[in-house]
Image: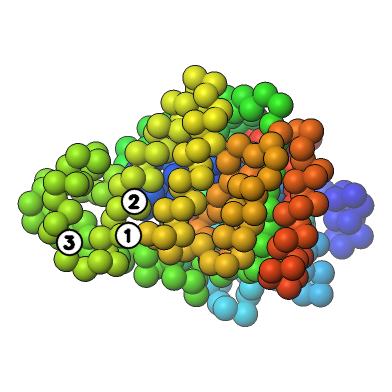
Amino acid sequence: MLRTKFESVFAKSPERFFFAPGRINLIGEHTDYNGGHVFPCSITLGTYAVASFNNSNKCSLYSMNFDSLGVREVSLDDLDYKKEDNWTNYVKGMIQTLEKSGYKIDKGMDILFYGEIPNGAGLSSSASIELVTGVLLKNMFNFDVDTIDLIKTGKAVENNYIGVNSGIMDQFAIGMGKKDCAILLDCNTLEYSYAPVKLDDYNIIIMNTNKRRELADSKYNERRAECEEALAILQKELKINALGELDAETFEKYKYLIKDEVILKRAKHAVYENIRTVKATEELNKGNLKAFGELINQSHISLKNDYEVTGKELDTLAETAWKQEGILGARMTGAGFGGCAIAIVKKDSTDKFIENVSNTYLNEIGYKADFYIANIGDGAKEVI
Ligand code: GLA
């Protein structure tokens, strides 16, 4: 399908094919920029890019998801961000940022993109485009660049080029993902380990609120600022660089320093969510699925009450999920404010689960939610 489409758009054959997944985060939300732990995995849904050199100094970019925009021409001499350049800004940002790090990109290409991740659903479609572009550039130009550098480049594009102050979780999960494993990542040190996701007779179900969330105009940056304020207050008494360094005992002892109730709630989430994440990984590794599910539920409650990033749509999905037969745990995943939640549900209860949650959501919210079974796949790579 991609080959045929490429041939019809560019009137020649593609040379190489690349793929980058989307991601879900099992637990550890809004902890990455607080120097804490996250526990995400890459999913088999993602973004494909198909490319061929074109003997010019322009890239001709086409996305099957934005058919009506047609082929967009990007000159390699003019890579600055332009709002009207829409989705191609992610590609331009990767080229420009890699060039600034010394990688020479001096040959134009025709590239066709196809994304399977619903865009704006909080499954990291933007980090997926960044990383698929990263592996494409690495392989087409034979760059000697590590995956971790492509991950950091993706984050730099998001932060400095697109203007979203996000952490490293999404790019890391998408770059380093491994089939059937989640990644426990310490965002302070970037040390990581893989944990096999052995859920026996349970499925991970992605539940999409179909409420779009735009990271840039959401309250994401506001939450970051609130956490920075909490950290600055605690640093008057404590030698710490991040909220993620605090254990429960130290936080409880010094939290009196934070007088503002809202700032205190934000810090409490950051500290305890980090603790829950490490604990949840241990429980999963030991096969204690019930305890793992319980921590997932607590994560949602904290994101609802203390971090206040869920909203009616995500709460309806998670709270309805908790009442169903065969449920192990459910929570929002990603930044929040819309987007997706995940639920871990017994395989033989899955159909009934989807039917019930779907009906309640439609009744209470007034439009449909979508449901997909998540499969955990590999990170960004060239595909044959
Ligand atoms: C978004 C950001 C991530 C992370 C999550 C919340 O997905 O891109 O860096 O902060 O939100 O955990």
Which residue is identified by label 3?
258
| Residue at image coords 50%, 75% | 217
Q: CA distance from mark 3 to mark 1?
A: 11 Å
Task: Provide residue 180's location: percent of width, then percent of height.
Answer: 64, 29
The answer to whether residue 339 shows anywhere in this view is no
Q: Nearer the viewer, residue 258 or 47?
A: 258
Residue 114 visible in the snapshot: yes
Q: Amino acid at mark 1?
A: Arg
Q: Amino acid at mark 3?
A: Ile
Q: Which residue is more in the foreground, 338 or 240? A: 338
Using the numbered discs, state the Cα–Cα distance from disc 2 to disc 3 in whole angstroms: 14 Å
Q: Residue at x 57, y 67 (%)?
A: 312
Label 1: which residue? 266
Q: From what the image shows, is residue 209 above or below residue 46?
A: below
Residue 200 picture location, percent across and down: 67, 24
Q: Which residue is mark 2?
A: 270
Of mark 2 and mark 3, the one earlier in the sequence is 3
The x and y percentages for residue 95 are: 55, 58
| Disc 2 element | helix
Asked if labels 1 and 2 touch by Cβ distance under 8 angstroms, the answer is: yes
